[in-house]
Image (spheres, rainbow, N blue to C red):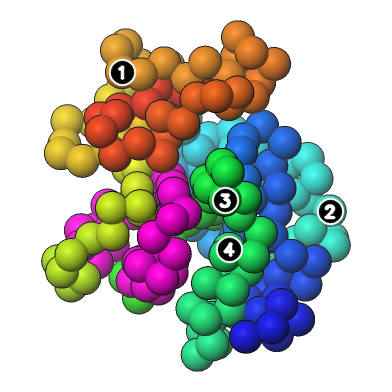
Amino acid sequence: MNLKTARTVTGHKSGLGKPSKMPGYSTSLPASACKVGAKLAKVAGSVCADCYAMKGHYTFPSVREGLGKRLAALHDPQWIEGMITLVGHYTDTSDPYFRIHDSGDFQSVEHVLQWIEVARALPWVNMWAPSREVAMVKMARAMAGDWPSNLVVRISAPMVGKALDMSGPTSSVDAAGGNQCPAPTQGNECGDCRACWDPNVYRVNYHKH
């Protein structure tokens, strides 16, 4: 599939996102479409109560339009092939890291399975998805069989200051223990840290911002 078609079928008119903080590229969806996150946004003390993706430039009409197109594109039968093309094209082979959803979250079990197919097709790209959709991810794991080793879905604790007691990669915000995110001490950038993408790092603890 050529890049023009890939951008069209995935809703990425201008290509993939490029967060300044971290290595590689990313994709995003509207935070307002989060299933669990939209509910947590109304809960005081939750990690979604002051969501960065619900303010600032995310509120600009052009940005909202782009996010909406990417959400609608999930139902395109060519979405998987298109995303494989985009991620494979943009990812630097010398530092092959990609973030799934710098805003937004999985929309369904089928959506998780779509990303599993993308990861399987690009085994050389390390992919990380933060998520609060525990039920979706568990069901997708059961349905998928062998989980691709290059895909890390890190389940996020819902409340600030609390960690999750569960198997598999997780994350927390301002909770004791865990692998402390170094970004606040190095210009709010990942630098050479790749803990979020590492399936052997049980928990990454971020600082509220």
SS for callout 1? loop
**Element type where label 3 sits in the image:** loop
State the residue at coordinates (36%, 53%).
151
Marks 1/3: CA distance? 29 Å
C-alpha gap between disc 4 and disc 1: 30 Å
Q: Amino acid at mark 4?
A: Val
Q: Residue at x 85, y 62 (%)?
A: 62
Q: In the rendered image, which residue does mark 4 sit on? A: 87
User: Which residue is denoted by mark 2 in the rendering?
Assistant: 60
Structural distance between the alpha carbons of marks 2 and 4 = 25 Å
Q: Is residue 135 left or right of residue 8?
A: left
Say if mark 1 contacts mark 3, CB within 8 Å: no
Determine which quarter of the picture holds residue 147.
bottom left
Residue 88, x across and y down, in percent: 57, 65
What is the crowding at mark 2: few (fewer than 14 residues within 10 Å), some, or many (at least 20)? few
Question: To which residue does mark 1 refer?
Answer: 178
Query: How far is mark 4 from mark 3, CA to CA?
Result: 11 Å
The answer to whether the residue labelled 2 contacts the one labelled 1, judged by CB atoms less than 8 Å apart, is no
Q: Earlier in the sequence, mark 2 or mark 1?
A: 2
- Which of 154 and 71 lies nearest the eye of the viewer? 154
Give whichever of 47, 89 is nearer the camera.
89
Q: Where residue 102 sits in the image (x, y, percent)?
A: 58, 47
CA gap, disc 2 and disc 1: 35 Å
Q: Residue at x 66, y 21 (%)?
A: 188
Judging by the rendered image, the residue that carries numbered circle 3 is 93
Q: Earlier in the sequence, mark 1 or mark 3?
A: 3
Question: Residue 47: horizontal and vertical position, in percent?
Answer: 46, 32
Asked if 178 appears above or below 98 in the picture, the reply is above
Q: Amino acid at mark 1?
A: Gly
Q: CA distance from mark 3 to mark 2?
A: 33 Å
Give the extent of the magenta segment: 112-141
